[in-house]
Amino acid sequence: MRKISCVLSLLLLTAFISNAQVPTPKEHFGFNIGDNYMLATYTQTEAYVKKVAATSDRAKYVDIGKTEEGRSQFMMIITSPENQKKLDRYKEISRKLAHAENLTDQEARTLAAEGKTVVWIDGGLHATEVVGAHQLIEIIYQLTTRKDAETMRILNDVIILCTHANPDGQELVSNWYMRNPTPERRTTNQLPRLYEKYAGHDNNRDFYMMNLRETQNINNQLYIEWLPQIMYNHHQTGPPGTVVAGAPYRDPFNYVFDPMIVTSLDALGAAQSNRLNAEGKPGYTEKSGSNYSTWYNGGLRTTTYFHNMVGLLTEIIGSPTPSDIPLVPQRLIPSSANTFPILPQKWYFRNSIDYSVSLNYAVLDYASRHHDELLYNMYKMGRNSIDRGSKDYWSLSPKRIAEIEQLNRAAQTATGANANAAGGGRPGGGGGGVQMKFYDSVLKNPENRDARGYILSADQPDFPTAVKFMNALIRTGVLVHKASAPFTVAGKSYPAGSYVVKTNQAFRPHVMDLFEPQDHPNDFLYPGGPPVAPYDAAGWTLAYTMGVKFDRVLDAFDGPFERIPYGELQSAKANAVAAAGAGYILNAQANSSFVATNDLLKEGIEVYRVTEALAGTNASIGSFFVPASAKAKTVIEKTAADLGLQVSTIAKRPTAVKKIAPARIALWDTYGGSMSSGWVRFIMEQYHFPIEVVYPRDIDTGGLRDKYDVIVFVEGAIPAPPSALPGGRGFGGGGNFGGGNNDNVPEEFRRMLGRITPEKSIPQLKKFIEEGGNVVTIGSSTNLAYHLGVPVSNALVEMVNGVQQRLPGEKFYVPGSVLRISLDSTDQAAWGMGSLADVYFDASPVFNISPEANSKGTVKPIAWFPNNKPLRSGWAWGQAYLQDGVAAFVANIGQGKLYAFGPEITFRAQTHGTFKLLFNELYASAAMPAGKTK
Ligand SMILES: [Zn+2]
């Protein structure tokens, strides 16, 4: 013991000497973190953490990459000076245990004993939740300066990655708040734009897709570099009458991840709530006390579960402007979800900072005391995954259990025993109830086995998009193989260059989750009652929404597969462009054909769309024909090289073609920023469509046809007309800040104010279309059809006492899920799509077209639900109501067209499989009155 205290005093002494220079936040910022009415900008914060790194031997500053607005995103690695010298070794141990490859149990235990727990703590992801970034500053300060025994122990056992999750957002929000010289009038409300350039709040829905640079930077640290055992993601705000909501979370949890995730969340949640209680800090709520679950993949916290990491989320109250804990009587009854109720009182920013420090310390203390266990458990979960993927394995899910119950019921009916069962009495067959043979016929059925792996053939029509999907897996640390030669599996041949993703790997849960359907349980408040909304999506299978073609392989398989090193991004093979005869054909099935087309049009090169199927090629109707020229070849070669676009040549000019021109495209947005619009803006940049963002006042001003050929309205832009029964979640939509007090809004942002109104905007849109403009509407903005009197109606209604009403949630409920539609791919809007597609549906509108309009062709269906079981992934209660409903249509109005897409065809820039449904509308053609292009 003497020896230990000696070492400790030495540590304390070193700490004292080396940290003498770390400036306090007050010295640097001019105020304490948590002072009323004071927020720090990112610029100030970045300067501070650099000073801390320069003066503390406990801290290392790492620039993890640039943000979308070009700032450097930081991660501070904080641990003891001794550990700082051996970071590479500890990182190696963390990685080895996480991957769980080629290790014996004993080797894993030895590594776990040597290693240090790696704990991720972030802040600032949702920039208006200002406690996040500020607790990060405070914890960096405290961990680099405190000398108490607990801190010293933590620094010895734990490597802490303090990471800023959204620098651009903090800069925007803090400047916005601080701009008012009167402290009492400062507010984070009424921000003019999104606090992440494209995604705003949806920056926390990007973690399996990684469209955004911030997400890429973060995931590179989480899944390629460090593989932390615990990650802690700070948010706001706690439910009224509480201070903070945290782990453990309510059901359902996702069935594909390891059960130790759930029990570890119990342990860490208990560590956090217990510490607050011990410190006399009431107001923690957990489980049913908040609506956070562990179902969704794609959040900064939740994606970690699919990688065997314990992901913590807290949602805390508080703001630099003092607030109140309101009186919520039910919250004052102690329960396991609210163990220590907080009484109504005044609440200050500093309270929230202190709570956050306690919550961080609870996690760090646990990580210190259980460091070998945490490291070993991550190995164990990885090992479990490898084992499950190495043998015949049947995952449990509600669908399978329902099959067993269904077989049992059928048998009872056949033997006349159903009377018992129906009456809720003891089921037939004796005490246990259900007979084992039904279990065997479902959960031992070879066809129901989990896949051993997935093969993505290199000869699929949109291979570059398949490669994007592979990169999404690779960026989160999934192990991917690539075939170096042609091979055959289960009787099917694949070319060299095809990708293989096997499930016998540590991050099997993530692989399963992105290739297989989510089977969300039927979750109702009570039997027969209303549905309980999932925290976010119910289903999202990325391979489906990206339109990637793949084969599931149920038996062990092998081939000439080369292992891609972890994190090594792929690019589709640069395709050589052959010398053309008459010209080039760019297949409309490939999204990257639109990039090449836009680049060609920008250069003033002629491009045509082929309006009939081309004999002797695999190119679909709607493919692009580019007459041979040296200039065209140069542009096409660039896309072929950069994006792996496959280009074919054609000897003879196709006869049925239609010349296209660049369209003048307007995209609706609103003051404060629409996330849906931001994501489309992102897609437009990625696919090289030049666009102009317009606001409601620009619409109301009129003269639209002189300026634009196409206007795009995403979810939430167009409000419902009062007299209609429209569908969709956003039926009351219409954007932000239409009426309220806008005195706070600086002059430069006022042009963004206002909303689309039936009085001023709709007549201008009507005129625009009548004069030959096209309008594309998505989600609730399909409301425009009702405003314009298009003969369509909501398909999801029923008659109640002779009155038509929307179907209630007890009968029909489809939260964010993937559904299958049929398409008329001979229609221009669906060119390149094929006859079936998976769409993202989020309580989306569904239509009936009046028989007369249908027969006259004035309204034409583009996509519809062909049967009573369209669910592909997620939850679709009462899905039979969808049968024959129209998902998308085009209406002819005057000289122009209104396109209506109920489902979210551009959802979060993830649904690559349906982007073409938008792209196809974004060209002007000779059939339209020529407008000047710019
Ligand atoms: Zn948040």
Image (cartoon, helix red, strand yellow):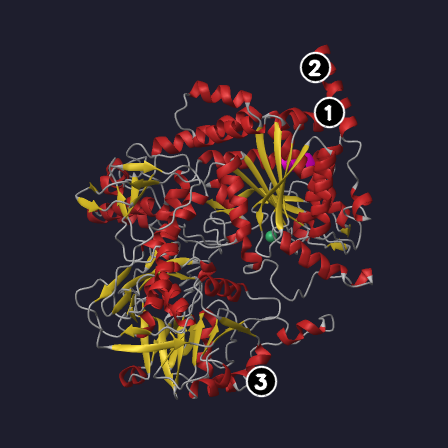
Whichever of callouts 2 and 3 sits on the residue coming sooner in the sequence is 2
Give the amino acid at mark 3.
Thr
* Mark 1 or 2, nearer chain start: 2
**CA–CA distance between discs 1 and 2?**
12 Å
Question: Which dot, 3 or 1, sits closer to the camera?
Answer: 3
* Residue topped by disc 3: 701
Say which quadrant the N terminus sits in: top right
Whether residue 119 is visible, yes or no, is: yes
The image quarter containing residue 59 is top right
Q: Which mark is residue 4?
A: 2
Magenta-colored span:
272-276
Q: Residue at x 72, y 36 (%)?
A: 54
Inspect this view and state whether residue 282 appears. no
Give the residue number, with chain letter if any, for mark 1. 149
Numbered mark located on residue 643 in the image: none
Q: Amino acid at mark 1?
A: Ala
Q: Position of residue 146 (x, y in %)?
A: 75, 31
SS at mark 1?
helix
Whole-percent x and y of residue 934?
48, 77
